[in-house]
Amino acid sequence: MLPIYKALSFINVLPGGTTRPWAIYVLGEDNKPHQFVVKVFRDNPLQPQPAVANEVLGFAMAELFELQTPQAAFVEFTQDFIETLAPQQLEQLGTAQVGLKYGCRYIETPHRFSPALAKRYLAGYDMASIYAFDNLILNRDRDAIKPNMLLVGQDAYLIDHEISIVGAGYAQKELEIGEWTYQYQEHVFFNHLRSNQLEDILKLFNTFTWYLQNANFDELLPYCEQLIELGFDVEHFASFYRYLRYQNANSSQFEDILKRTLL
């Protein structure tokens, strides 16, 4: 489960995100302030999106596959914190979903991500694992325009998973007839991975497949239970869980599909 931190003070609105995320200080479990990025998702009753649940499940999935992602938490906006906000932030907050917010540790990076930079800093198997991971969780938001990745030294931190997870039931039906309709051509690493020699493509996903074979997806259940207790929409979790169990039992099929996407 994720910890719940209290917001202490607002720093600024971060550039680049469609959700206009905030950089703030939160009070950590060590009773010290820590810089976090908090998503202030809009409340849209006409087009409800399980954005918070997707962020939480995306974080938990990355942990299962030992992919780098900033430490996540729920953040409480106390009345004392809200009273310190400027009018622009109060206006944004007025259109946001009520309740706790999703946040993650702020990571300072000296580099603006680009595929060329990634090729210099990341090992080939890391790119393949990230590509495979995004295929698995149906992430539609890691392309060349918006890679949603932070490079720090040799590490790539994956962020922003709100546009993922949904559609797992349909994806499983496609898998059962040997099809795969995820838009993998748009992925930030697609062209680089596709440029590998055939003998290398055949070995690209060995590491990821090992994790898929050995993943215990029951470890997602406490996160789902916490989301339910906090009042977040998790209606899509059951189909996602069934889909993951299918992938776990048919990992060699998924590895073959991943290879096929690059041939």
Image (tube, rainbow, N blue to C red):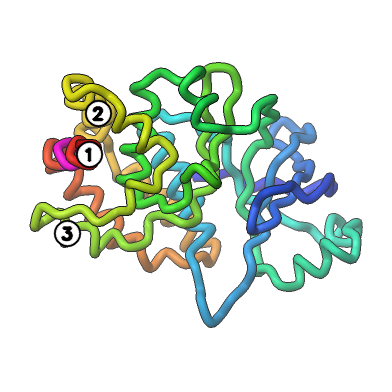
Circle 1: residue type: Leu
Relative to the observer, which residue lies in front, 99 or 57? 57
Left-right relation of 203 to 222: left
For disc 2, the neighbor class at 10 Å (few under 14, some 14 to 19, many from 20) is many
For disc 1, the neighbor class at 10 Å (few under 14, some 14 to 19, many from 20) is many
**Residue shown at the point (75%, 42%) measured from the top left:** 26
**Residue shown at the point (65%, 64%) measured from the top left:** 99
**In this picture, is 82 found above or below 127?**
below
Left-right relation of 38 to 212: right
Residue, disc 1:
258
Circle 3: residue type: Glu
Residue, disc 2:
205
**In this picture, is 169 found above or below 118?**
below
Asked whether the beta carbons under mark 2 and mark 1 sit within 8 Å of each other, the answer is: yes
Circle 2: residue type: Phe
Which residues are the magenta region?
A: 254-258
Counting labels gives: 3
Q: Where in the figure is residue 12, as x and y percent of width and height? A: 82, 47
Q: Earlier in the sequence, mark 2 or mark 1?
A: 2
Mark 2 secondary-structure assignment? loop
Residue 56 seen in the figure: no
Q: Earlier in the sequence, mark 2 or mark 3?
A: 3
Mark 1 secondary-structure assignment? helix
Q: Which mark is residue 21?
A: none
* Distance between mark 2 and mark 1 Cα atoms: 8 Å
**Residue shown at the point (66%, 32%) measured from the top left:** 107
Residue 253 seen in the figure: yes
User: Mostly what secondary structure, the magenta segment?
Assistant: helix
Q: Which mark is residue 174?
A: 3
* Distance between mark 1 and mark 3 Cα atoms: 14 Å
